[in-house]
Amino acid sequence: MLGSRKREIRIQADSFREKCKISRYGIIDLFKECDRIGYKLLRYPLGENGDLGFALKKDDDIVIFINTSIRLSREIFTLAHEIGHAMLHLNGEQPFIDNNATIAGGSGDEKEQEANYFAACLLMPSDEIERFIDLELPDFEKNGLSGMDIARIMSEFNVSYDVALNRLEYLGKIDGQQKTQLETERTEKRVGNLLKSIGGNSRLNIAGNEIAIPYEYIDYVIYNYNHNAIPRETLEKVLECYQLTIEDISDRLVEFPEEDDDLDDLIGGLED
Ligand SMILES: [Zn+2]
């Protein structure tokens, strides 16, 4: 990636971040930001081996899907990566579908690298990392970073241990040797324990299995049901995602005449 392209990507990440609610350093809730900006965000547990997420453009809508069977910190990074595709690459109908290979596997694909760079700049901008280390980690100059410090950075910026290490290495805050030491410390102490020991956000390290579908999808589904395009079971399944039943929306359903009569009428009509 050329330096000039990186700068363009940082400008895009910065423009998105400007609209976000920030705690002291990190974005508080990237999921909410997507809703606010008007992206159609779907979160659903597809299973640990399912794809991580995708981004696509449908008419005027940006649709982002995220698999919630994955640790929350990774889910957030996937979301940031998909926002990167949305801002940098989505002009045609071609969707971007992401899995371990495109996001974490160091795939050579330039657009995947760009989306990863966007995600890193959005979640962990260099000036905020600088400020965090300066104000929150007073022993940094003397002792460098410990596993607990990484857990502090994770909790503030809502990133995984790996993403934090990669970003800190990229920004020159740790070198290759320190990174290896911190990886060893992670293996020995476990990330969950490190997060607990600093009173950090332990939820980052577990899968949320969240289900979140934009509310307007109910309208589409009811419309399709009322036009006989989907069976009752599908309607029920979708409603279940919103913790609703048929009774809850019964006033919005069109009653159809007995199916057989309807079919006869139709066939009769065609034969005329
Ligand atoms: Zn991607």
Image (tube, rainbow, N blue to C red):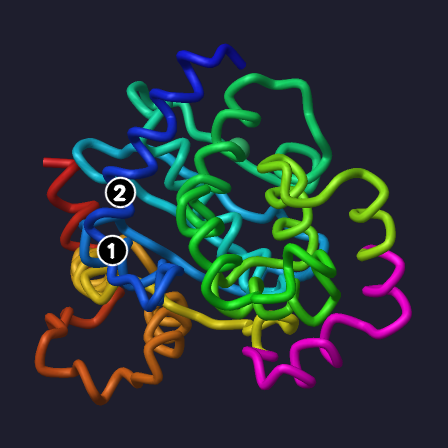
Left or right: residue 201 compared with residue 161: left
Q: Closer to the camera, 249 or 225?
A: 249
Q: Residue at x 81, y 64 (%)?
A: 186
User: Which residue is at the front of the view, 148 or 131?
Assistant: 131
The verdict on label 1 being within 8 Å of ligand 1 is no
In this view of the protein, which residue sits in the foreground, 271 or 88?
88
Q: On the picture, is 60 further left or further right than 117?
A: left
Highlighted range, magenta: 183-202
Looking at the image, residue 2 lies above or below residue 178:
above
Q: Residue at x 68, y 58 (%)?
A: 161
Kind of element beneath mark 1: loop
Q: Is residue 168 magenta?
A: no
Q: Identify the residue position indicated by label 2 in the image.
A: 16
The single residue placed furthest to the bottom in the displayed view is 247
Q: Residue at x 52, y 46 (%)?
A: 53
Amino acid at the residue labelled 1: Cys
Q: Magenta region, mostly helix, strand or loop?
A: helix
Q: Marks 2 and 1: in contact by CB < 8 Å?
A: yes
Image quarter of residue 240: bottom left
Q: Which mark is residue 121?
A: none
Q: Amino acid at mark 2?
A: Phe
At which x and y percent is residue 72?
A: 56, 66
Dot 2: element: helix
Query: In the picture shown, does residue 96 fall above or below 108?
Result: below
Relative horizontal placement of residue 138, taking residue 259 as reference (left or right): right
Q: Is residue 228 visible?
A: no
Q: Residues within 10 Å of mark 1 (few under 14, many from 20)?
A: some
Q: Residues within 10 Å of mark 2 (few under 14, many from 20)?
A: some
Mark seen at residue 20: 1
Q: Does ligand 1 reach within 8 Å of label 2's beta carbon?
A: no
